[in-house]
Image (spheres, rainbow, N blue to C red):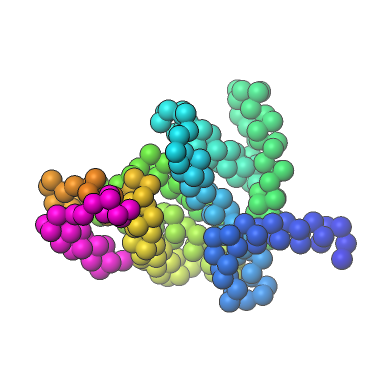
Amino acid sequence: MNTLENVAALLLTCCFFSIFVFDEDCGLLMPQEIQKHFFVLRAFNAELASVKEVHHIRNQGSSGQTGTTATVALQLRLQWWNDSIRQIYGEEKQSGADPSLANLSISCWESPIVRALYHVNSEKNLTRRFLERLIDAREHDLELDQFAKMEDATRYAEKSVSSLLYLSLECFGVKEDAADEAASFAGAGIGLTTALRGTPIRLTKGEVPIPAELLRSGFSRTSLMNSVVGEGTMSEADAKNFQEAVEQVAVTA
């Protein structure tokens, strides 16, 4: 194995370790020749998802950060990923850009996931728009604790999950409208189902994965969140409404 192959193997190992933390069975049934590309994409997606999650972990207890300061820090992290995508596709910074930010762009190549993603793109010619949609979806989610409408939740699911499916199809060399349409519906369904599965955890973080329009006027979010940690109970009306709302999301998925 030559030096280049050693580097590629090391990058792949880093990506596999990154997704193993979140889903140890991820991609194990994929064809051998596609696994490495799939692992890199999933590692990239896991890194994006972790931006908000790491913030939640750091802020358990007391953080000392204001909401605005924390949001700006998260936005900068996602902007770093946007800059990394530009670097991967060979796009230089605009001439008027702040020179003090140059090191941030250069630093992207220190990330094994960015370097691995560069190699995948070189081999598979990934659609840049899909990578950027993954970042956009996470950026939209930074300050959001509940979607207003069902269509908003569905749109987010499509953007954050279907985009990953589109990229996975491209790793197989599939770029067809029919396949993308199927991936669009599948991604929306997977995204909504994942939101439902994570309901107990999201509630402990102050987030309600059920769209507000499905909950009755006067629904007590506080009672809902307290009931999850065993510090209270919901009213009978709220409990019935919440169950019906969950069923509605499941039907939509």
**Which residue is found at the position 50% from the left and 53% from the top?**
130
The secondary structure making up most of the magenta span is: helix
Name the image quarter holding the C terminus.
bottom left
**Which residue is found at the position 54% from the left and 60% from the top?**
22
* Nearer the observer, 202 or 39: 202
Q: Residue 192 occupies which quadrant of the picture?
A: bottom left
- On whether residue 70 falls in the magenta region, the answer is no
In this rendering, the answer to whether 18 lies above or below 101 is below
Residue 176 location, x and y as percent? 48, 68
**Which residue is found at the position 65% from the left and 33% from the top?**
104
Residue 155 located left or right of residue 134: left
Residue 26 location, x and y as percent? 56, 68
* Nearer the observer, 178 or 133: 133
Residue 186 location, x and y as percent? 39, 68
**Which residue is found at the position 18% from the left and 59% from the top?**
239
Q: Residue 170 occupies which quadrant of the picture?
A: bottom right
The answer to whether residue 21 of the structure is visible from this angle is yes
The answer to whether residue 124 of the structure is visible from this angle is no
Region in magenta: 226-253
